[in-house]
Image (tube, grey):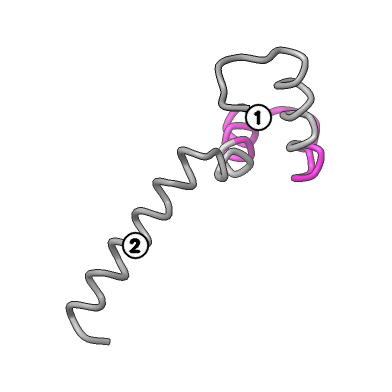
Amino acid sequence: MSPGLSVVATGFRGFARYLGGVLGADAYAKYLDHHHTAGHGEPPLTEREFWRDRTDRQDSNPQGRCC
């Protein structure tokens, strides 16, 4: 890979990580990190359970969001 292309690819990956963070795509990974750090006694939610719970909480308590 040429040096210029490598710089562009690195920049794109950084932008994709930033955009994923803004859109909440990394929410489950953050939840797992927090769950592990906090030392909860029960196992963490599965990814499917996590997103279902998050969606249910947003529907029952809507805050400023686009839709």
State the image quarter where residue 2 is shown: bottom left
Q: Which residue occupies 34% across, 62% down?
A: 12
Q: CA distance from mark 1 to mark 2?
A: 35 Å
Q: Is residue 24 above or below residue 2?
A: above
Which quadrant would the C terminus be assigned to in this image? top right
- The answer to whether residue 32 is magenta is yes
N-terminal of the two: label 1 or label 2? 2
- Residue 42, image x, y percentages: 80, 31
Q: Nearer the viewer, mark 1 or mark 2?
A: 2
Which quadrant would the N terminus be assigned to in this image? bottom left
Q: Which residue is mark 1?
A: 39
- Residue 22, image x, y percentages: 46, 38
- Residue 25, image x, y percentages: 57, 45
Q: Amino acid at mark 1?
A: Gly
Extent of the magenta region: 31-49
Label for residue 12? 2
Q: Which residue occupies 22% across, 70% down?
A: 7
Q: Which of 19 and 47 lies nearest the eye of the viewer?
A: 19
Relative to residue 7, is residue 35 drawn left or right?
A: right
Element type at mark 2: helix
Q: Which of 52 and 33 lies nearest the eye of the viewer?
A: 52
Q: Which of 40 and 29 lies nearest the eye of the viewer?
A: 29
Q: Amino acid at mark 2?
A: Phe
Element type at mark 1: loop
Within 10 Å of disc 2 (Cα), the crowding (few <14, some 14-19, many 20+) is: few
